[in-house]
Image (spheres, grey):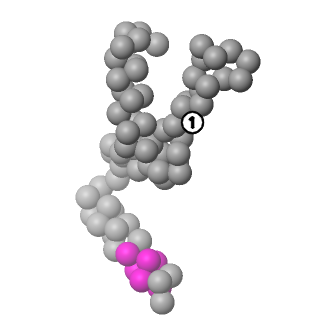
Amino acid sequence: MGSEASTVSNMLRRLEQNHIIYRKQDKSDHRISNVYLTEKGIQLQGPIIWKEHRQKMLSGILPEELLLMRRITKAYGREFNK
């Protein structure tokens, strides 16, 4: 992975403290901890992916087109929430 074990451990500890992941010890080998996303972590996947790829996805769209897309999306949201 290219990271020091202590760096990964600290990162996992922070994610666990923020209830984004949880660790579960492997039943057959207690030296191994499996890492899983919590419900909160699963909900964050979409925004993170969007943020990562936003620039690439929107790079070929003109500002006027983005504005129109936002207006249409808001109108759909208003209609959906009636």
Q: Looking at this rendering, what residue extends furthest in the right direction? A: 28
- The total number of labels drawn is 1
Amino acid at dot 1: Tyr
Q: Quadrant of residue 8?
A: top left
Mark 1 = which residue?
A: 36
Residue at far left of view: 63
Neighbourhood count class around disc 1 (C-alpha, 10 Å): few under 14, some 14–19, many 20 upward? some
SS at badge 1: strand
Q: Is residue 62 left or right of residue 73?
A: left
What residue appears at the point 41 percent right and 71 percent down from the top-left corner?
73
Residue 16 in the image: x percent, y percent? 42, 37
- Residue 36's place in the image compared with 66, above or below, is above
Dominant SS of magenta comes to helix
Question: Residue 3 vs residue 28: left or right?
Answer: left
- Residue visible at 59% across and 31% down? 24
Q: Is residue 12 above or below residue 68?
A: above
Q: Position of residue 36 (x, y in %)?
A: 57, 36
